[in-house]
Amino acid sequence: METATPVSKKMLWTGRVISALPAILFIVGGLFAIINPASMAQGMEHLGYPAHLARTIGALEIICGVLYLIPRTAVLGAILLTGYLGGATASHVRIGEPPIMPLVVAAFVWLGIYLREHRLHAITPLRK
């Protein structure tokens, strides 16, 4: 396996900014679900989930978003967010809606982590 070279400052900061977008989305969305689960009830039921799960799902969103922001746990956070977004994609497909938003957010999650984490460059199939 080839060794990865550290990312440039420009690439690192671009990755941080791109990573902040989905992280903020998850943390704020999770806080909203915990603070005001009644307002989430309609959306939960629309996707086929019981309204009482809003707080649990909100807590999971916050945990995944925070893990994604911490440099030591960022890759784990990206993997967990991918699982979460996979479930969101499946939920949208199941009810006949296009899963555009979860797929776009997943692309931002991985673009952000790829730009800021040099070790991923050595294990991805992108070649120069």
Image (tube, rainbow, N blue to C red):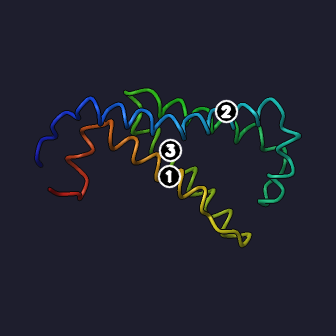
Dot 1 crowding, Cα within 10 Å, few <14, some 14–19, many 20+ = many
Question: Which residue is more in the foreground, 12 or 42?
Answer: 12
Give the side of residue 38 with respect to residue 79, left or right: right
Q: Are marks 2 and 1 in contact (CB under 8 Å)?
A: no
Give the side of residue 15 with respect to residue 1, left or right: right
Dot 2 crowding, Cα within 10 Å, few <14, some 14–19, many 20+ = some
Distance in Å between CA atoms under marks 3 and 2: 17 Å
Among the two numbered marks 3 and 1 on one chain, the one whose residue lies closer to the N terminus:
3
Rendered position, 83 above or below 57? below
Q: Residue at x 59, y 62 (%)?
A: 100
Among the two numbered marks 2 and 1 on one chain, the one whose residue lies closer to the N terminus:
2
* Count of residue discs: 3
Q: Tell me the SS state at disc 2.
A: helix
Residue at the farthest front position: 10
Q: Amino acid under label 2?
A: Val
Q: Amino acid under label 3?
A: Leu
Q: Are marks 3 and 1 in contact (CB under 8 Å)?
A: no
Q: Residue 43's x, y, as percent?
A: 81, 52
Among the two numbered marks 3 and 2 on one chain, the one whose residue lies closer to the N terminus:
2
Q: Tell me the SS state at disc 1.
A: helix
Q: Given this view, does label 3 or label 1 mark the residue nearer the observer? A: 1
Numbered label attached to residue 80: 3
Distance in Å between CA atoms under marks 3 and 1: 11 Å
Dot 3 crowding, Cα within 10 Å, few <14, some 14–19, many 20+ = some
Q: Residue at x 86, y 47 (%)?
A: 41
Q: Residue 65's x, y, as percent?
A: 55, 35
Res 26 quadrant in image:
top right
What residue is shown with label 1?
A: 106
What residue is shown with label 2?
A: 28
Q: Residue 76's x, y, as percent?
A: 43, 39
For the C terminus, which image quadrant? bottom left
